[in-house]
Amino acid sequence: MIESLEEAFKEVAQLPEDEQRYIVEIIRQGIASEKRWQTLFQDPRSERVLENLVAEALAEDAARETEEIRGETFLS
């Protein structure tokens, strides 16, 4: 285990149990999500799906159906 992870676990160990349980759930959800993404990207069909998404995005951009995202407006 890397040192920074050990330090983080020591910090979490000092929190109340309900907060520790919450953090454990967040970590487990993150690991499960990462495994799902890995499975999806390993599927041979994923390349075709991604190519279709890229083509769609490029077509929307060429048709001026997109807008530029800058600084603070990103994801807001």
Image (cartoon, grey):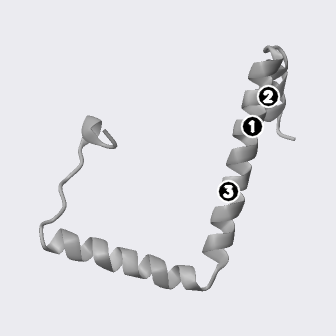
Quick one: SS at disc 1?
helix
What residue is shown at x 82% (from left), y 39% (from top)?
2
What residue is shown at x 79% (from left), y 28% (from top)?
21
Does the CB distance between marks 2 and 3 fall below 8 Å? no
Indicate the quadrant where residue 52 lies. bottom left
Name the spot of residue 62 as percent of width and height, x first.
Answer: 16, 74
Quick one: SS at disc 2?
helix
Quick one: SS at disc 3?
helix
What residue is shown at x 31% (from left), y 38% (from top)?
76
The residue under label 2 is 21
Does the CB distance between marks 1 and 2 fall below 8 Å? yes
Give the mark, 1 or 3, whose residue is nearer the N terminus.
Answer: 1
Image check: 34 left or right of 9? left
What residue is shown at x 32% (from left), y 79% (from top)?
55
The residue under label 1 is 25
Name the spot of residue 61 as percent of width and height, x first.
Answer: 19, 69
The residue under label 3 is 34
Q: Nearer the viewer, mark 2 or mark 3?
A: 2
Q: Amino acid at mark 2?
A: Arg
With respect to residue 71, does 45 lie above or below? below
Image check: 11 left or right of 29? right
